[in-house]
Amino acid sequence: MDAQPKYLALVDRLRLDIEAMPTGSSVPSERSLAAEQGVSRMTARRALDELEREGLLRREVGRGSFVTRPAVSLPLRLTSFTEDVRARGLVPSSRVLRLETAAAGTDLASLLGIPASAPVTRLHRLRLADGRPMAIERTALPASAVPGIDEHDLASGSLYEILESAYGVRFDAGEQTIRAGIIADADAACLEVDAGSAALELVRTSACHGEVVERTVSTYPGDRFELSAQIEPATARGPERRSALRERD
Ligand code: GLP
């Protein structure tokens, strides 16, 4: 078996150091790394290149390298977690935290547009990218739209792919609200962040042919995601277009 290339051994050592350093700290230069670690500058450069590719450091011309955390861009479109993570070159996976079907109750029923006594499937998942926890997603689906969903592999599969292939659901409309939040005590350990730290919450309601099939509250630690959207002039779609900014419920 081939020995591990030198730069990869250095990457492993540096990754541990970098993960223990706060975001924004400065990372030794190629030259000082080579001297400190007793490797060639070429090896030091390849290690820094790899860490940059993994999103763990950012290089600024003339200033040096700084610790960062991999951020996944969440487009403001109806894409799935799986698609967003793959677009960043990372491998998505999930851990199912809860999967059960019970009566909706009034609040959820009105959000999903179904009677309060109608059954709803609640699916809570920890979402990971390259094995690193990125979000907790709490999804509610009208059970009548997804009979037998618990027989699918929700730990390695994409919910959207399952909805499309097994139930013919391809979302054609949706609404997404983005708000600031904090990480709840119960979610902190799973997400590997401190309780009370900053979070980004996305609340998405997605529909297919006028029927709501999904309502998901996604909680992302604040340092792991950024949102990006194409913006257009306010006049582009007529005066009735409402502002995206509104008072929180
Ligand atoms: C995004 C959305 C969620 C949706 C999920 C589906 O994260 N914010 O509302 O449930 O994608 O992802 P997947 O198909 O990977 O399970």
Image (tube, helix red, strand yellow):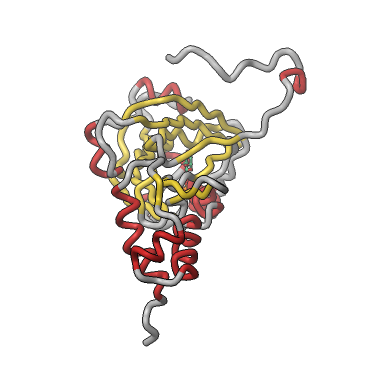
Quarter-wise, where is residue 218 in the image? Answer: top left
Quarter-wise, where is residue 102 in the image? Answer: top left
Q: Position of residue 9 (x, y in %)?
A: 35, 70
Q: Quadrant of the C terminus?
A: top left
Tell whether 235 sits left or right of 11: right
Residue at image x 39%, y 74%? 6
Q: Position of residue 126 (x, y in %)?
A: 34, 46
Of 77 and 191, nearer the camera is 191
Of 71 and 68, nearer the camera is 68
Q: Position of residue 64 (x, y in %)?
A: 49, 49
Instruction: Please determine whether, in this image, residue 210 is positioned above or below residue 156.
Output: above
Residue at image x 60%, y 38%? 77
Instruction: Please determine whether, in this image, residue 222 is positioned above or below residue 27.
Output: above
Of 188 and 8, nearer the camera is 8
Q: Position of residue 230 (x, y in %)?
A: 66, 34
Q: Is residue 211 visible?
A: yes
Q: How many marks?
A: 0
Q: Is residue 148 visible?
A: no
Instruction: Please determine whether, in this image, residue 124 is positioned above or below residue 200.
Output: below
In the orientation shown, which residue stands out farthest toward the bottom? 1
Tell whether 157 sits left or right of 172: left
Residue at image x 45%, y 33%? 215
Q: Quadrant of the N terminus?
A: bottom left
Instruction: Please determine whether, in this image, residue 144 is positioned above or below residue 184.
Output: below
Of 8 and 232, nearer the camera is 8
